[in-house]
Amino acid sequence: MASASSSKVPAASPNTPPDSCDVLVYGTGLVESIVAAALAWQGTNVLHLDPNPFYGGLWASLNLEELKAWTDKINSPATNDTPFSNAYLYISRNLDPRKYAIDISPHVLFTRADLLNLLIQSRVSRYLEFKPLGSFHTFEQDSFEKVPGTKEDIFTSQNLTLLTKRSLMRFMKFVVIWDETPDVWLEYKGKPISLFLKEKFNLDEPQIVELVHSIALLSSPSSPTELALDRIKRYLSSMQVYGNFPAMYSMYGSGGEIAQGFCRSAAVAGAVYRLGTKLSSFDDESGVAVLDNGEKIKVTEKLITSYGLLPSSREITRMVAVVEKDCKEWFAEGESAAIVVFPPETLDGNKYAVQALVLGSGSGQVPLGQAVWYLSTQESGEQGRKDLFLALEKMEESILRESTEDFEFDVSEEDIAYLPNGMPVVSSVRLGESLRNFTPKESLKYLLKLTYTQKVTVPPPQPGSKTIYVPAPSIDIVYDGVVTRAQAIYEGVTGTTEDFFEVDFEDEDDDATATGNPPDTSIGDVADIDDEELGDHPDFDEEVAGEMTI
Amino acid sequence: MAVARDSTSSTRFAQFKLVLLGESAVGKSSLVLRFVKDQFDDYRESTIGAAFLTQTIALDESTTIKFEIWDTAGQERYKSLAPMYYRNANCAVVVYDITQAASLDKAKSWVKELQRQANENIIIALAGNKLDLDGKRQVETAAAEAYASESGLLFFETSAKSGENVTELFTAIAKRLPLETASSRQRTAPKGVDLSRPNRRAPAASNNGCTC
Ligand SMILES: Cc1cc2nc3c(=O)[nH]c(=O)nc-3n(C[C@H](O)[C@H](O)[C@H](O)COP(=O)(O)OP(=O)(O)OC[C@H]3O[C@@H](n4cnc5c(N)ncnc54)[C@H](O)[C@@H]3O)c2cc1C
Ligand SMILES: Nc1nc2c(ncn2[C@@H]2O[C@H](COP(=O)(O)OP(=O)(O)OP(=O)(O)O)[C@@H](O)[C@H]2O)c(=O)[nH]1
Ligand SMILES: [Mg+2]
């Protein structure tokens, strides 16, 4: 192993390529890039290559020229080193290709997440800009319902009965300390979350659907209880960490953009970068890597590669649409993003949820007046595409209805309810009904449409002793598991994770305000917040009851 | 870029992103080190460590400019600069070495790239570095100056070693930056989340929040 005391500077003179390295990292996807940076800062001599002319590998965000080339490549029968295939791409004429950044594996970041802590600790967050994502919708009975993700939402909701409110409040109190109270859920370990919510908390179907699919962002109602509880808790505890939103996204692209940040960090620590360079062969015995230009590189420790994975039979389906609409109707005030979830059985018998991430021009991914919709499902083949097209249709109908200004409808006195503070609100159930009767005159202009499939990949059954494989991004829209995987690979090289990004940045400037501290993710903290919040409502239950008398 | 007025006085602060470009070993990092820390290191190896420095300069009593300076960290060496590097850059210093004629050609190609791909209002300065090695000069001042003026670039010959013209270079850039319009050009898009400021606790739940 390269010791931490070895020089951080590659021995090679600046303009001649290095002919040896401790670790060769092949692929600039998110996981590999984190590993490259961690190793470089630890003192390992890292050479980082990518066969593509862009950063991000399977996580990349591409401009339209790159996207065209990428679809050609994954459709080519000669390409066997990518999990993507079956791309259908339509791009409308006269778009400026550089004004778009299309994510091939879109992700969002919860404000309580190990990746965010690592971004702050490693200072990579300083290269990036994150925007808030506070708007989560569930598609129910032909309309988009805003998810009540906080106690206030539940408390003021017009759609919930008193009984449901009580059950939900009881569940929310439990879920923030679920891991400390195994007696409540242990018998449901590995069993469907929907069963647990129904039997233990008496929750009704609509609430279960929202909790499982829109809050936990899980695809199937039979997801294991402990996983779902963890993700529901994460959603709730992510609220108010930075403001009135539980999640964020990075501008100009998700994982590929964050990967670029880690690559820059690795370069700062001395890693050498070469894009557009293919690895022709690697001899696991001797550690000799041969590049496509014939150069030989002696790898003394490990090859870490995101290429050479084998496709499994499982497949997921993705779709991207760029529309000529800003879609601000779906965004919270001051935001430029939303998540829309179509739970199972809401799209003509879809088995899995369809998730849609909507980003407006504030994301830097599309020009002003446009939005990009990223849809995905765990369904495969024709069915997968059918589910996505149906969801797209629903989204189209919805945005046309909601964005039509001259739309009027009658509100009668019984449609109006009053909040405890006297503020009148229109019942959203009633609103949804009226909206359904509205036929849009306008049509939606699609500037880009792309569908493609992604095979779930596995490492080869017998990897070489010097070779470590990096898994492809999962369909999960959250970054869960990325840091853990990077740490495991790091441990595979150095034998420990103790010094993973244990960096003393004394070399860097001391502009401490730009750094910040990772948000404390301790359970105690969450519980405290919860108690204090409740403390502000000593008579919370009475208030709930009071509201129901309206 | 961000512009803010101090509420207590009429001081104006503006922050700009500045990127450095140029062939390896022309002295990009040395120029930054001179500007930010007023130091020079004869045995400086290729860029490591600090690649994100800030320096503040006072243009006059009422105007302070903060440069957020991005060094390439060597990623340009094999044409592997990340798009992130150029993104939203307000100004660029393209450096060549006056003792290496080829480094000016390289500088010209960077200028071309910038003019083609970067923010159209980007301010570009051309810096002929290692002025202290005048005896070994290969690039004539007049030739470089002519190129700079026809391409609309600021031009300086500098020495990171002696410090000559280094502050002048950055001050000239600062003076060109569009301070007046900076605030009005702020995007209407929502602002990024300040990750250094997590709320230590949830704010008191408000009862008057409208959920309509
Ligand atoms: C030498 C050089 C190489 C470059 N290489 C790349 C590259 O490989 N890939 C790349 O994507 N960009 C690349 N760029 C482009 C650069 O990142 C942005 O396009 C530039 O910052 C445009 O800023 P603007 O505010 O003038 O553009 P505007 O037209 O005002 O752009 C509006 C917003 O969208 C962002 N934006 C514009 N184009 C893109 C884009 N293509 N992708 C993501 N966001 C964008 C801008 O940063 C800006 O915030 C390169 C630029 C240069 C100078
Ligand atoms: N004489 C003299 N030497 C200089 C000057 N500026 C830089 N150098 C030397 O030139 C060499 C390269 O300087 P760097 O600042 O590392 O160059 P760079 O452009 O950042 O190089 P990379 O990081 O490899 O891209 C070092 O040995 C410096 O000491 C100068 O003004 N005069
Ligand atoms: Mg340097």
Image (cartoon, coloured by chain):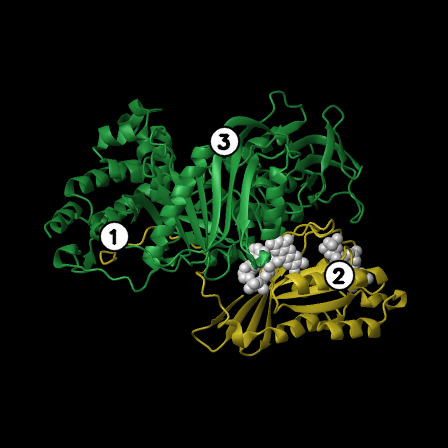
Chain colours: A green, B yellow
Give the SS element for disc 1: loop
Which residue appears at 55% of the width and 55% of the height?
A: A100
How busy is the neighbourhood of tag 1: few (under 14 within 10 Å), some, or many (20 plus)?
few
- Towards the viewer: A112 or B143: B143
The image quarter in which residue A12 lies: top right
- The reply to whether dot 2 and dot 3 touch (C-beta < 8 Å) is no
Query: Which chain contains the residue that carries disc 1?
Result: A
Which residue appears at 43% of the width and 55% of the height?
A: B197
The Cα–Cα distance between marks 1 and 3, rounded to whole angstroms, is: 37 Å
Of labels 2 and 3, the one closer to you = 3
Of labels 1 and 3, the one closer to you = 1
A263 left or right of A296? left
* Label of residue A315 in the image: 3
Image location (x, y in percent) of residue A451: 50, 42
Q: Is mark 3 within 8 Å of ligand 1?
A: no
* Label of residue A437 in the image: 1
* Residue A496, visible in the rendered structure: no
Image location (x, y in percent) of residue A60: 57, 45
Image location (x, y in percent) of residue A332: 35, 56
The Cα–Cα distance between marks 2 and 1, rounded to whole angstroms, is: 60 Å
Give the SS element for disc 3: strand
Q: Is mark 2 within 8 Å of ligand 1?
A: no
Which residue type carries mark 3? Glu
Q: Relative to A455, is B10 above or below?
A: below
For label 2, the residue is B109
Q: First in sequence, mark 1 or 3: give its number.
A: 3
Which residue type carries mark 1? Asn
Query: Which chain contains the residue that carries disc 3?
Result: A
The image quarter in which residue A531 lies: top left
A386 left or right of B102? left
How busy is the neighbourhood of tag 2: few (under 14 within 10 Å), some, or many (20 plus)?
some
